Image (cartoon, helix red, strand yellow):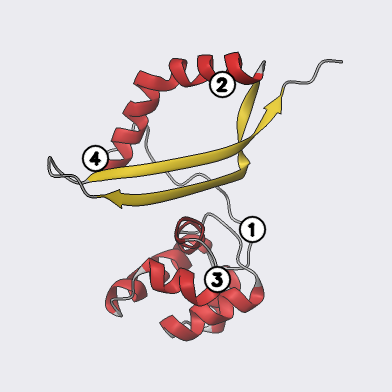
Amino acid sequence: MNRVIATEIIIREIKNKQVKYQELADAIGRSLVWTTLALHGQAVMEKHEAEKIGELLDLDAEIIASLQDIPDRGSLDQMPPKDPTQYRFYELLLVYGTTLKAIINEQFGDGIMSAIDFTMDISKVENPAGDRVKVVMEGKFLPFKKW
């Protein structure tokens, strides 16, 4: 089955069954961010994980198999993105990108932060002035190779 179509079906079933991403993450023993990434077609699940999700969402074998396929990563169809939440992250990089790079290079040297050897956590921080979104990203530093 086409991964894009499978993802649409998976997301529809999550909404129809009113299941929270956290519940699905807990059921397979993975983080909220990684599980949501996989359910949105951007990561590969192990067979037992895909089967558990299939059981919880009543998915057929073809869709369960699609969760185990290596995806074409990168899900934004348009740049800049139109969705306001996605656009704010794009805007964040436009404004803070040079600062992030400068600080990483100053503290680590000439290289980059991996998005492959990477973890991320998103949490809600209650604040009387308005709740806050806390995003913590941790990626392995990869120095540029000289040869």
Label 3's element?
Answer: loop
**CA separation, marks 1 and 3?**
20 Å
Residue 78 visible, this orientation: yes
125 and 47: which one is in front? Answer: 125
Farthest residue to the front: give it. 128
**CA separation, marks 4 and 2?**
27 Å
Q: Which residue is mark 4?
A: 84
Determine crowd level at label 1: few under 14, some 14-19, many 20+ residues with C-alpha closer than 10 A: few
Tag 1 and tag 3, C-beta contact below 8 Å = no
Classify 30 as above or below 107: below
Compare marks 4 and 2 and give the one earlier in the sequence.
4
What residue is rendered at 87% in x and 15% in y?
147
**CA separation, marks 1 and 4?**
28 Å
Tag 2 and tag 1, C-beta contact below 8 Å = no
What residue is rendered at 54% in x and 65% in y?
30
**CA separation, marks 4 and 3?**
31 Å
Farthest residue to the right: give it. 147
Determine crowd level at label 2: few under 14, some 14-19, many 20+ residues with C-alpha closer than 10 A: some
Q: Amino acid at mark 1?
A: Ile
Q: Which residue is mark 3?
A: 29
Label 4's element?
Answer: helix
Q: Which residue is mark 2?
A: 104
Compare marks 2 and 1 and give the one earlier in the sequence.
1
Label 1's element?
Answer: loop
Determine crowd level at label 3: few under 14, some 14-19, many 20+ residues with C-alpha closer than 10 A: few
Tag 1 and tag 4, C-beta contact below 8 Å = no
Q: In the image, residue 41 lies at what x, y percent?
A: 50, 59
Q: In the image, residue 38 lies at what x, y percent?
A: 51, 61
Determine crowd level at label 4: few under 14, some 14-19, many 20+ residues with C-alpha closer than 10 A: few
Q: In the image, residue 64 lies at what x, y percent?
A: 55, 76
